[in-house]
Image: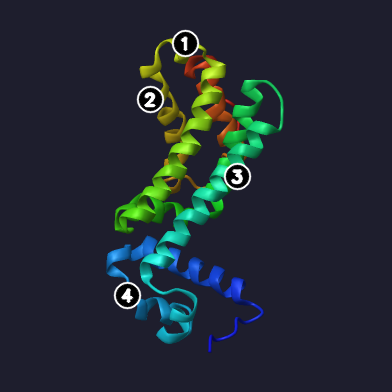
Amino acid sequence: MARPQAADYDDRRRSILEQAAALFAEKGFPRTSIAELAQACNASKSWLYHYYPSKEAVLYDIMSDHIGRLLEATEESLAAGGDAGTRLRRLARALMEIYGGARTQHTVLVNDLGCLPEKQRKEIVRLEKRLLEKIGALLQEINPRLSTVPALRTPSVMLFMGMLNWTYTWYDESGAISPVEFADLAADVFLDGFSATGVPDYS
């Protein structure tokens, strides 16, 4: 007879994912054991296996949840209306908000994608490509030259995402520039060029 699900089953799964993301980000997925994860959850290994059949299943949910949030935020930002520049600025703000609260999850996505089984890895890559395609379509709207010189599209998308994607390695949201201000700066640089944006006063 199957063990019944607790009323807080989903909350416990989310807690496992949070603890696992912190451990994987600190130690790396290959060097983190199920025993260590169970200890971080103040639980036994058998309790953990009730929620996840394997460490890889935990890893997949961390990544799919994170990329799913990024994709949802992108779709909402692009659907909210306004000209292309307004939508780009809105998108940059939405992504920075997510990155600020998901540093460990993003670290895991960047560092441990290769640790997933092939089928699950391909699914995450598919979602990433879908995200980048949506951003590429917006950038092509901003600069139609991307449609006549297709070779520029991917580099342009990666330039924009690179300004935001790697903030988890260095950006301090408690510093002089807030996440919203940083997002606006990234959008301004991308839309108008660095020399045109000047140096905003963040004092």
The one nearer the camera, 170 or 14, is 14
Q: Which residue is drawn at the image coordinates 43% and 67% (left, top)?
A: 58
Q: CA distance from mark 1 to mark 2?
A: 13 Å
Of the numbered discs 1 and 3, the one sitting upstream in the chain is 3
Q: Which residue is drawn at the image coordinates 43% and 80% (left, top)?
A: 49
Seen from this angle, which residue lies furthest left?
31
Do tag 1 and tag 3 residues touch (Cβ < 8 Å)?
Answer: no
Q: CA distance from mark 2 to mark 3?
A: 23 Å
| Residue matched to label 4 | 33
Q: Which element carries disc 2, helix, strand or loop? A: helix
Of the numbered discs 4 and 3, the one sitting upstream in the chain is 4
| Residue matched to label 3 | 72
The one nearer the camera, 53 or 172, is 53
| Residue matched to label 2 | 155
Q: Position of residue 121 (x, y in %)?
A: 36, 52
- Amino acid found under the numbered disc labelled 3: Glu
Q: Position of residue 15 (x, y in %)?
A: 54, 71
Do tag 4 and tag 2 residues touch (Cβ < 8 Å)?
Answer: no
Q: Which residue is drawn at the image coordinates 52% and 56% (left, top)?
A: 65
Do tag 2 and tag 3 residues touch (Cβ < 8 Å)?
Answer: no
Of the numbered discs 1 and 4, the one sitting upstream in the chain is 4
